[in-house]
Image (cartoon, rainbow, N blue to C red):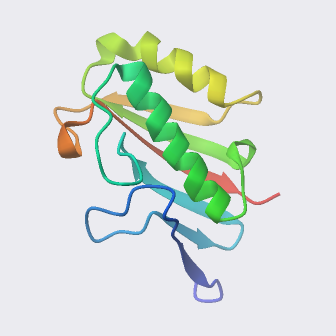
Amino acid sequence: MSDKKIQPVITPKAPAAIGPYSQGIAVGELLFVSGQTPLRADGTLVEGTVAEQTEQCLSNVLEVLLAGGLTMDAVVKTTVYMTDLGKFAEMNAVYAKRFRAPFPARATVQVSALPKGAGVEIDAVAVRP
């Protein structure tokens, strides 16, 4: 990977990183979007339903993608972290509206907790056309 230039992707339209990581990292044709929680750009948490939290997570993913010159159509893989898989259908309904076929590969896992008390976190990998 020494011949590939690593570039951070940063936007004020998504929440700032709350730790030692970048909102996104571009290398070659790939853009890696760090896990996005349901924080608004000002850092406040969307404390609503899983559907509302998923909307915010995906809006944040989109803002990082846009800052890197891409859209949701470029996403090839996501991971969804949830504190309650019993609400999977609620998350999935929102997720299905934000992507179109061919849908990205995806893993969804239940975790015991997420930063700032969030119920959902989503990361993504995108590829430049």
| Left or right: 13 in relation to 113 | right
Disc tally is: 0
Q: Residue at x 42, y 53 (%)?
A: 41
Q: Position of residue 6 (x, y in %)?
A: 56, 81
Residue 72 position (above or below residue 68): above
Residue 7 pos. (x, y %): 57, 79
Where residue 54 sits, quadrant-wise, is top left
Q: Position of residue 40 (x, y in %)?
A: 39, 46
Q: Who is closer to the viewer here, 66 or 111?
A: 66
At x 43%, y 20%, the residue is: 51
**Vertical side of 128 occupied by 121: above or below:** above
Q: Nearer the viewer, residue 44 or 60?
A: 44
Quarter of the N terminus within the rendering: bottom right
Residue lying farthest bottom?
Answer: 3
Furthest residue to the front? 42
Along the line of sight, the residue nearer the viewer: 38 or 29: 38
The answer to which image quadrant residue 32 occupies is bottom right
Quadrant housing the C terminus:
bottom right
Q: Residue at x 33, y 34 (%)?
A: 46
Q: Is residue 56 above or below residue 60?
A: above
Q: Residue furthest right?
A: 129
**Image location of residue 27, percent across then percent down:** 62, 73
Horizontal side of residue 35 vs 28, given as left or right: left
Answer with left or right where residue 10 lies relative to residue 43: right
> Which residue is drawn at the image coordinates 27% and 61% (left, top)?
18
